[in-house]
Image (cartoon, rainbow, N blue to C red):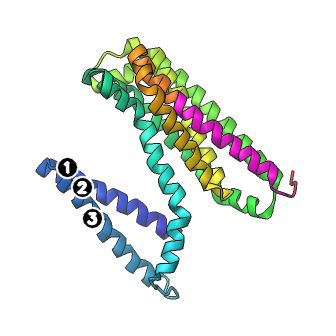
Amino acid sequence: MDIASFAKTARIAIASLFFIIGYVATRDLFFTSLLMLSASAVVLAGFVVIMKKAFSSLDFRFEFQNVGKLLWACLPLCVSALLQNYIVNSPKYAIDMVLSSDIQGIFNILFLPVFAINVLSMFIFNPVVAEMGKWWLAGEKGRLIKSVRIHVLVLLLITLLAAAGGYLCGCELLGFVYGVDLRVYKKLLSALMLLGGVTALATFFSVVVTIMRKQNRIIIAYAVAVIVSLIVSRPLVESYGLGGAAMLYGVVMMTVMLILLISVMRGLHSKTMTVNR
């Protein structure tokens, strides 16, 4: 696991570096994307060789049947990731249809800290994912429910602190970095930070659902959110501008979070588990 984690980190870092260099040198996005893909493939192949040397007992065999099973098992996560990418960016698409590029730029600046909450949340719950998986398989209901509750409370606390910090000094800091006066958007930034907490909860619940081997529920959650987004995105942004874009993001992420929360609760109460307090 440590070598695999290092390999993934190195692949992303090297591919990103090639992307930056390629785009600065050519300004051709298509060529740069191919360059990044090639760099990723070379690094990935290199680490396969490294792992074979590090673990001499490994016997590498390419079997289409096993690859097919793996792709099928991971398909729900792949589709969910694509749908998630769409709904996270749906406010930007709506702004692009209705408002100006200047408003789009302001929204992108205000939206940046939302991702920070989600990334920070992963540092909190990722270290215990393996343990949660063991508790699920062992039927230790008490420990799993306790862990879920604790992580939800921690994520809520972080969200409230981030929203308060965003209201007090977030606009000033972002304005200083980007050279834009954002002080009139204090409330909007705080609202987006709160919605970032909803996104973090949705991400956490998707991990728990995956532990339960119910990945299809993730597809359902994001598919419903995409449908909701297609229905309400333009009316909200036309009526409320930037505020409507924030409301759109809140509606779609609340939809995802609530569906996944229901899936987690049903999964925890349907499985016969040993209570371990």
Specify whether residue 266 is painted magenta.
Answer: yes
Type of secondary structure dominating the magenta stretch: helix
Q: Residue 252 at x, y = what percent?
A: 52, 33
Q: Going by the image, does 269 lie left or right of 64? A: right
Mark 2 and mark 3: Cα distance apart in space: 10 Å
Q: Nearer the viewer, residue 145 or 69?
A: 69
Which label sits in the foreground, 2 or 3?
A: 2
Q: Which mark is drawn over residue 29?
A: 1
- Residue that mark 2 sits on: 33
Specify whether residue 50 is painted magenta.
Answer: no
Q: Residue 102 at x, y = what percent?
A: 26, 21
Q: Nearer the viewer, residue 247 or 181?
A: 247
SS label for mark 2:
helix
Instruction: Report the span colored magenta.
Output: 251-272
Relative to 237, say whether 86 is above or below.
below
**Image marks 3 and 1: residues in contact by CB distance under 8 Å:** no
Please name the amino acid that badge 3 sits on. Answer: Ala
Which label sits in the foreground, 3 or 1?
A: 1
- Residue drawn at x 55%, y 47% is 122
- Residue drawn at x 43%, y 84% is 53
**Image marks 1 and 2: residues in contact by CB distance under 8 Å:** yes
